[in-house]
Image (tube, grey):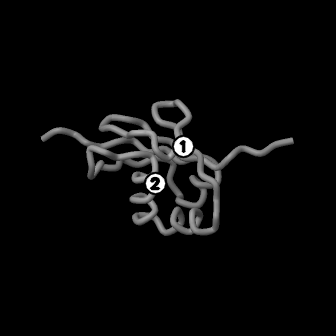
Amino acid sequence: MKDVSITVLYFASLRDRLGLDRERYALTSPDATVATVLDALAERHDALREAIGAGAVIRAAVNQQFATPATPVAAGDEVAFFPPVTGG
């Protein structure tokens, strides 16, 4: 059986809210995008759903390259989610 999973990484406040820094996720569609993966993960994790529902801006990277919600995601990819960095 072919592995259709990706590695998902969580950073900063997302990591703190979820209580984990990474997980494996099996893609359910060959047309997966950052947005569809994030939506599916929000169904799995209440804390992530709450962050999105509260209007949190969540950034993403696919294979260490900044990504948009429409960026395709394929088996074997690494997808990272993180809040925008603020500083002064």
Estimate the x, y position of residue 1 in percent, counting from the top left: 12, 41
Estimate the x, y position of residue 44 in percent, counting from the top left: 40, 64
Are the residues tagged 2 and 1 within 8 Å (C-beta)? yes
Q: Secondary structure at mark 1?
A: strand
Q: Residue at x 47, y 36 (%)?
A: 62
Q: Amino acid at mark 1?
A: Ala
Estimate the x, y position of residue 16 in percent, counting from the top left: 60, 56
Q: Residue at x 41, y 49 (%)?
A: 23
Q: Nearer the viewer, residue 26 or 22?
A: 26
Q: Residue at x 64, y 59 (%)?
A: 56
Q: Amino acid at mark 2?
A: Leu
Image quadrant in which the C terminus is located:
top right
Which residue position holds label 2? 38
Estimate the x, y position of residue 11 in percent, counting from the top left: 58, 46
Q: Secondary structure at mark 2?
A: helix
Q: Which mark is residue 60?
A: 1
Q: Which mark is residue 12?
A: none
